[in-house]
Image: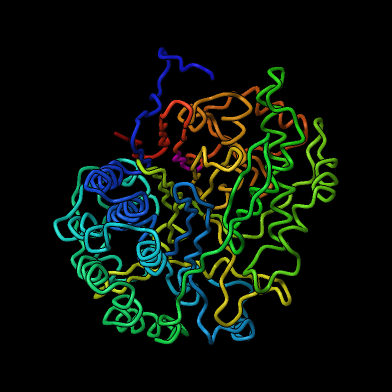
Amino acid sequence: MVERDFMKPGKSVALAADAMVATSHPQATLAALDILRAGGNAVDAAIAAVALQGVIDPHMTGIGGDCFALYTPAGGEPVAVNGSGRAPAAATADHYRDKGMTGIPDGTADAVTVPGAVDAWCRLSDSYGRAGLDRILQPAIAAAEAGFTITPRVALDWARYADRLSPYPASVAQFLPGGRAPVTGDRLANPSLARTLRAIARAGRQAFYDGEAVDDMLAVLNGLGGLHTAEDFAATATTISPTISAPYRGCTLHECPPNGQGLAALIMARLLDGFDLADPSLSATDRIHILAEATKTAYRQRDAFVADPDAMTVTVGDLLAEARIAALRDRISMDTASDPADLDMPVHRDTVYVSVADGDGNVISLINSVFFAFGSGIYAPEAGVLFQNRGCGFSLEPGHPNEIGPSKRPFHTIIPAMLFDKDKPVLSFGVMGGQYQATGHAHFISEVIDRGFDIQMASDQPRSFFTEGAISLEPTIDDTVRAELEARGHRTRWADEPLGGCQAVRIDRERGVLWGASDHRKDGIALGY
């Protein structure tokens, strides 16, 4: 393993023996640890953390969003939890095309799919948790009632994307007090959200999908032209299924099945598995070039085929077949960039990810999002719900598998991951960042497995991402690398904000040690005991 250079800025990987939590916000990590110390398990801790982040990171996540998770019980098989919501039953593609639309417009009620996160939390708690929702949601309730302090990265994002709230007075009143974004050190409360969380803690999913909260949510959405009905909310149901997986360097990478882009991460892993990325003679330019070419290849497959599984025209097995992967890999030249191609899906960066391993051997990898910053920008003030805009992920191209349709799930970018060695999980991780996530998964496991970095060092490495026709480079990458990439035919640009945010927990069973990492690009920490 590569040793950290303590003369350079950075932080050490977290180490513990009994339990480990990694989140992108210090308060969420502490809340999860408190749950574990009080006798809760990994599932309880993860829900507590992400529910709290829905209060203190409202631009990133919340009960108005969706949730995916991978969960491996001690000694058991991994399962995939799909808590993504659906379009209204009345949402036909012709309804939108008849209005002259070529895509689902952001910042409108048409972009709001029914939130699935609360149902997923309740299903996880009921099926795998130990502590119960009443205990789990207390940190979130307390923060919403008493208020919370704005941290630096949260303040940066809040200010940057505040204009997404400006069309809606109720949103401005709650999230832009005094007409401005709160700054680092400010405090903010959300009593309406506290009431809804308290009702969920008491009555479970019914309090969100079939209670007073629904009346307020429907009044807001229908008042803005949304097609949502009480039946759409009541019908929300999380799906639990086997994972999908692919080999990488003798390990197995597990992802959630479609409608998420985990399949793209698996395609990338299979493509990269054909290159010797452990070769020390490979330059930074070589590595970024290979990653960009694999991204283009995998994302073209993703954009053409990944959708609600009921609508897909090819199978996961077809897309991961070795003959197909080998043919795609053979098209990647080490010397020349392939033709650039824009990604079909909208770019966004607003998600939170949580990883927890507990003392019993249970491991969970969980991700929750409102899609764009502050989601749709639409807020139901009595329920305290800020709605996602996940419907923007649908297509209006006739016949496309991801074409919007009644009660259909849209293509999703948010993906949790687990890496197994033989039949045991050895790495639970996620890389937030919208479109970047599949690329982030492939890059992260290569930095760990191929280059020998510990998980904190792997997270800290400079990032690049091919998107919108060019490679976006973090400015920690050298100017000479950029010039060499352009000499190979790539268009490049400097990233205007950090690419993604990684949290990870590594399980070292041989020595009985848990390793934790939280990205320096966020405010978070990894802690264990």
- Specify whether residue 41 is painted magenta: no
* Residue occupying the far front of the picture: 75
Q: Residue at x 61, y 71 (%)?
A: 103
Number of marks drawn: 0
Quarter of the rendering containing residue 140: bottom left
Nearer to the camera, 287 or 96:
287
Residue 45 percent location from the top left of the image = 32, 50
Nearer to the camera, 15 or 510:
510
Residues in magenta? 500-504
Residue 351 percent location from the top left of the image = 44, 53
Q: Main secondary structure of the magenta part?
A: strand
Q: How is the image coloured?
A: rainbow
- Specify whether residue 501 is painted magenta: yes
Q: Is residue 389 above or below residue 89?
A: above
Q: Residue at x 37, y 48 (%)?
A: 157
* Residue occupying the far top of the picture: 7
Quarter of the rendering containing residue 451: top right
**Which quarter of the figure is the N terminus placed in?**
top right
Residue 354 percent location from the top left of the image = 40, 47
Residue 21 percent location from the top left of the image = 35, 41
Q: Residue at x 82, y 35 (%)?
A: 333
Q: Residue at x 43, y 49 (%)?
A: 353
* Viewer can see residue 166: no
* Viewer can see residue 179: yes
Quarter of the rendering containing residue 184: top left
Q: Is residue 462 above or below residue 183?
A: above
Residue 234 in the figure: left or right of residue 293: left
**Which quarter of the figure is the C terminus placed in?**
top left
